[in-house]
Image (spheres, rainbow, N blue to C red):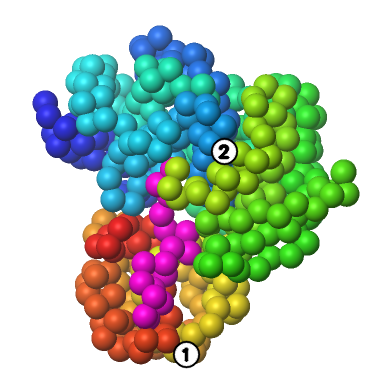
Amino acid sequence: MNYEQAVHYLYNKLPMFTRMGAKAYKADLTNTIALCTYLGNPQNKIKTVHIAGTNGKGSTSHMLAAIFQQCGYKTGLYTSPHLKDFRERIKVNGEMITENFVTEFVEATKSFSEEINPSFFELTFVMAVEYFVQCNVDIAIIETGLGGRLDSTNVITPEVSIITNIGYDHTDILGDTLEKIAFEKAGIIKEKVPVIIGETTFETKRVFLDKAEEKNAPVFFAQEKYKVVSANYLNEKLLLEVNDVGKNSVSGYLLDLPGLYQAKNFLTVLTATDILKENFSLTDTNIKQAVDHVKKLTGLHGRWEIISRHPLIILDVAHNVDGIQQLVNQIQISSYNNLHIIFGMVKDKEIEKVLALLPKQASYYFTRAQIPRALPENELLERADKFRLKGNAYSEVNKALEAARTNASADDLIIVCGSVFVVGEVNVI
């Protein structure tokens, strides 16, 4: 078996949520535990940070990984989904997992996998922790896939648990109220393990407090520990002045992730580093250097990412109600002449609620990712028309982008959004 055959096996032999949706989701940890046991429980041989949340967990994971790398720690990073290359999901110090390891792991687990029939995500997560053990990482940042309580990653006992926020996403699986979704995310809270909550609402705060009390877990609310005093732009980076409430001191940070929504994620990261400093040497100087170079250190893409300037072309993986609202807020503070939005979604999102948020004063280029879950572009066009969003349909994102470039003037703004998979299929990344 070579690498291409191994990846083909992962994609086609195992149920894959990103392609198939809910029918690929395994609502228990049985297979993950079986795989871990088969390999000698690698998840217990490394230190970890566990991150859940509706939005922001990817950015938060990458910022924390950058900080540990900058501070000299060998750092594993497990995230999903990927944009271009399967190996983006599993990195050590910003370098993707080797093709040889992927191939050898698939071969080594193939007979056992065919006995228990794990999902793509179950096998991929166990591959990650085994790789981190063999690389002898000092710490691994682990992002949940979906939810928390029954997510495959929830077999680890981390140094710190983090829940970024709660919003409406995957409601067919996680529940149709904020309280139900929060309950699933709160499932990552472990006995006596500190938990950091990025954002709360009236509906979700009590859920977290109750679970933390049940698990004897110290709980810290980032919004209470830190406040953003000001947010400005400097050379296409986000300049934040942040007040440490307990110390009543203000510090400045420059983030190379320029979306204004990153301010909330960064407060969560700062709160996490406060706790992690008890066992790791995380200096303020290194933290500042790291967040200014997250993309270089970790290879993060698709977060208000500028790929061209005349016209300004932005890629953003916002794909649910909360994410699109944050994106719309960002558009409102941006300078441009005309707005062009290249937009595609998958079938199982709250499509009408997302369409209702999008700006009416824009030219739309409706498209689809080349996966079974994608909503056909013509159907998306029809549904968008009910919300007075006008445009045309294109069979794939690069045709849509070519049309937008043709129609746009040098001072226009073009945004590609609505689906991680649409963004991933843009040729320039």
Q: Is residue 90 above or below residue 63?
A: above
Specify the amino acid type for callout 1. Answer: Asn
**In the structure shown, which secondary structural element does the residue marked by tag 1 occupy?**
loop
Q: Could you tell me which residue is drawn at 62 percent across and 46 percent down?
A: 288
The quadrant holding residue 259 is bottom right
Q: Is residue 376 above or below residue 148?
A: below
- Which residue is label 1 attached to? 337
Q: Is residue 388 above or below residue 62?
A: below
| Sequence-earlier tag: 1 or 2 | 2
In this view of the protein, can residue 216 be seen by the observer? yes
Please indicate whether residue 149 sits to the left or right of residue 75 in the image. right
User: Between residues 18 and 300, which one lies in front from this camera angle?
Assistant: 300
- Which residue is label 2 attached to? 67
Q: Which label was assigned to residue 7?
A: none
Magenta stretch: residue 307 in it? yes
Instruction: Quadrant for the C terminus, please.
Output: bottom left
Kindly report which numbered mark, 1 or 2, lies closer to the viewer in this rendering. Answer: 2
Q: Could you tell me which residue is drawn at 26 percent across and 30 percent down?
A: 98
The quadrant holding residue 328 is bottom right
In this view of the protein, can residue 350 be seen by the observer? no
Circle 1 residues within 10 Å: few <14, some 14–19, many ≥20:
few
Disc 1 versus disc 2: distance between alpha carbons? 37 Å
Residue most extreme to the top: 40
Residue most extreme to the left: 1
Rendered location of residue 56, percent (x, y): 56, 51
Specify the amino acid type for callout 2. Answer: Ile
Please indicate whether residue 250 sits to the left or right of residue 337 in the image. right
The span picked out in magenta is 298-314
Circle 2 residues within 10 Å: few <14, some 14–19, many ≥20:
many
Please indicate whether residue 141 sits to the left or right of residue 395 in the image. right
